[in-house]
């Protein structure tokens, strides 16, 4: 499974920690930036992740900004993107089970590294339930 990761400056440190953690387990995350702690605009970062997911260059994404809010709003503007802020362990499970999220979102200024790693693992180890949830996801894609 290919996983891409990207953050703005508010999530830079957490992004680096997550990459290092997975690398120590032999898993390389594809880093789409930002590549320093210098200030940048989170929509630009979301706009790098969106094509990676939609063009299937990555199976899943991880996006991080200061709170997770701005970058998830930016990513969710695009059809086919389901970016979910995994703000606790239950949410991490449900984001896969019911929402089949394709981007996990975290807040670099609001979440602890250990919690984030645990939530990523919960998400990766949970199956999408399908069924009635497919109907609901289809309605999201249809819009109004
Ligand atoms: C950047 O200062 C900050 O606004 C951004 O990282 C994010 O928290 C926005 O939602």
Image: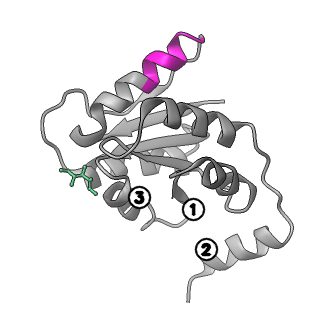
Which image quadrant for residue 10?
top left
User: Which circle's residue, 1 or 2, is located before the other in the chain?
Assistant: 1
Q: Pick out the residue farthest to the bottom.
A: 144
Element type where label 2 sits in the image: helix
- Mark drawn on residue 141: 2
Residue at 75 percent across and 55 percent down: it is 97
Q: Position of residue 7 (x, y in %)?
A: 33, 40
Up-down: is 50 above or below 76?
A: above
User: Which residue has dot 3 on it?
Assistant: 72
Relative placement, left or right, of 10 versus 72 is left
Task: Select label 1 or label 3 by which is in front.
Answer: 3
Tell me the CA gap for discs 2 and 3.
Answer: 17 Å
Going from the N terminus, do you reach mark 2 or mark 3 first? Answer: 3
- What are the residue bounds of the magenta stretch? 18-25
- Which tag is nearer the camera, tag 2 or tag 3? 3
Which mark, by number, is residue 80? 1
Tell me: residue 137, above or below residue 35.
Answer: below
Mark 1 and mark 2: span between their CA atoms? 7 Å
Q: Which quarter of the rendering shows the C terminus?
A: bottom right
Asked whether residue 102 is drawn in magenta, I would say no
Q: Look at 86% across and 67% down and name the residue there.
A: 131
Q: Is mark 3 within 8 Å of ligand 1?
A: no
Compare marks 1 and 3 and give the one earlier in the sequence: 3
Residue at image x 38%, y 64%? 73
The disc placed on residue 30 is none
């Amino acid at each position: 499974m290919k996983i891409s990761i990207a953050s703005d400056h508010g999530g830079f440190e957490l992004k680096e920690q997550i990459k290092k953690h997975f690398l120590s387990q032999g898993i390389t995350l594809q880093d789409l930036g930002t590549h320093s702690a210098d200030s940048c605009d989170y929509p630009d970062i979301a706009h790098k992740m969106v094509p990676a997911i939609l063009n299937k260059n990555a199976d899943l994404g991880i996006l991080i900004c200061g709170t997770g809010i701005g970058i998830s709003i930016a990513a969710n503007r695009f059809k086919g993107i389901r970016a979910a802020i995994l703000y606790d362990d239950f949410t991490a499970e449900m984001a896969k089970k019911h929402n089949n999220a394709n981007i996990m979102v975290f807040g670099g200024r609001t979440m602890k590294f250990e919690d984030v790693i645990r939530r990523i693992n919960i998400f990766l180890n949970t199956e999408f339930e399908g069924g009635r949830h497919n109907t609901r996801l289809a309605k999201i894609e249809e819009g109004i």
